[in-house]
Amino acid sequence: MDPAGKAALRVGGMTAGRPDDWTASVADWTHLDGAARARLAAIPPVSVPAGAVLFHPGEAVKGYVLVLEGTVSVHLVGPTGRGIVLYRVAAGQSCVQSTLGLLGGDAAYSAEAVADTPCRLVILPGGVFLDLLDTSAGFRAVVFAAFAARMQEMMRLTERMTFGRVSERLARLLLDEAGPDGTLRATQDDIAQTLGTAREVVARNLAAMEGAGLVRRGRGRVSVTDRAGLGRIAAGGA
């Protein structure tokens, strides 16, 4: 592995695993040509614990990050320390912060990435990433398709942040992120960071929703009790 790859494995408490054909577990990568898959499979996955910080703003880009297992949140943190979750990277997805840095020649991250859960991921050294872009049409198609999808998601986030009320965004978050049992397991601080607002604003809106019979609050969780009512709020209704 080149020096860039070795440096990547020392970041955020990462533990290197053994090389294996991890490409077989990622749907988008199974159709790559044999030469590209062989180069990718030679890069060993790494494991990180929940809470590990993968990178900080201003830190040099380490490589192209692909999550195999777990979830990573990418946060933008303001001067006051308040942050907003820009996006989450789930299993089989890549981190657009890495793509931006490698493609644009801007070798520094502008956000912070934190493992929400224990994660298994692969970091492609910059040289390998750029060479595969030049030599593998399949690799290039996967990278740019993922990049385009993430940028569309960022545009939707910008639209919601600019034009959507907190109550609408909170209702949508509850509807989208509640588990099969109808419960979102997150603190009010977590929700505030996701929405890019203050905890007090979240608490006030949740109290109003609970008073209207739409949700039920508990310690570190919010349970949805009226999806239709939340849907009306998310759509801009009263």
Image: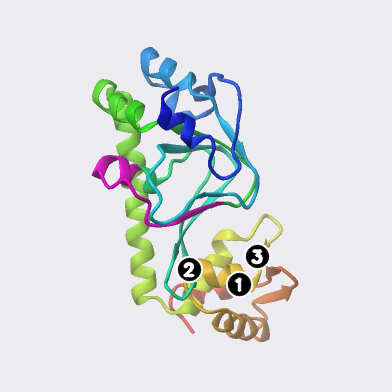
Comparing 92 with 82, the one in front is 82
Tell me which segment is drawn in magenta: 99-114
**Residue nearest the viewer, comparing 33 with 235:** 33
Q: Which residue corresponds to mark 2? A: 83
Q: Amino acid at mark 3?
A: Ala
Protein image colouring: rainbow
- What is the spatial separation of the Cα atoms under label 2 and label 3, in whole angstroms? 16 Å
Query: In this rendering, which labeled residue sits more in front, label 2 or label 3?
Result: 2
Residue 224: horizontal and vertical position, in percent? 66, 69
Q: Amino acid at mark 2?
A: Gly
- Residue at which label 3 appears: 186
Q: Position of residue 1 (x, y in %)?
A: 45, 22
Secondary structure of the residue carrying numbered label 1: helix
Eyeballing the image, is 233 above or below 138? Answer: below
- Residue placed at 71% from the left, 68% from the top? 220
Give the answer, above or below, for where 221 lies relative to 152.
Answer: below
The residue drawn where x is 34% and y is 74% is 162
Q: For residue 11, which numbered disc appears in the image?
A: none
- Visible in this render: residue 117? yes
Count all numbered tags in the image, as a single digit: 3
Q: Are marks 3 and 1 in contact (CB under 8 Å)?
A: no
Q: Is residue 12 left or right of residue 149?
A: right
Q: How many other residues sit within 10 Å of disc 1, few (<14), some (14-19) or many (≥20)?
A: some
Task: Choose between 53 and 120: the one closer to the eye.
Answer: 53
Residue named by callout 1 = 189
Q: Residues within 10 Å of mark 3 (few under 14, many from 20)?
A: some
List x then y, in percent, for residue 174: 58, 67
Taking the magenta stretch, the answer to whether it contains residue 110 is yes
Q: Residue at x 40, y 37 (%)?
A: 64
* Badge 3 element: loop
Q: Quadrant of residue 210?
A: bottom right
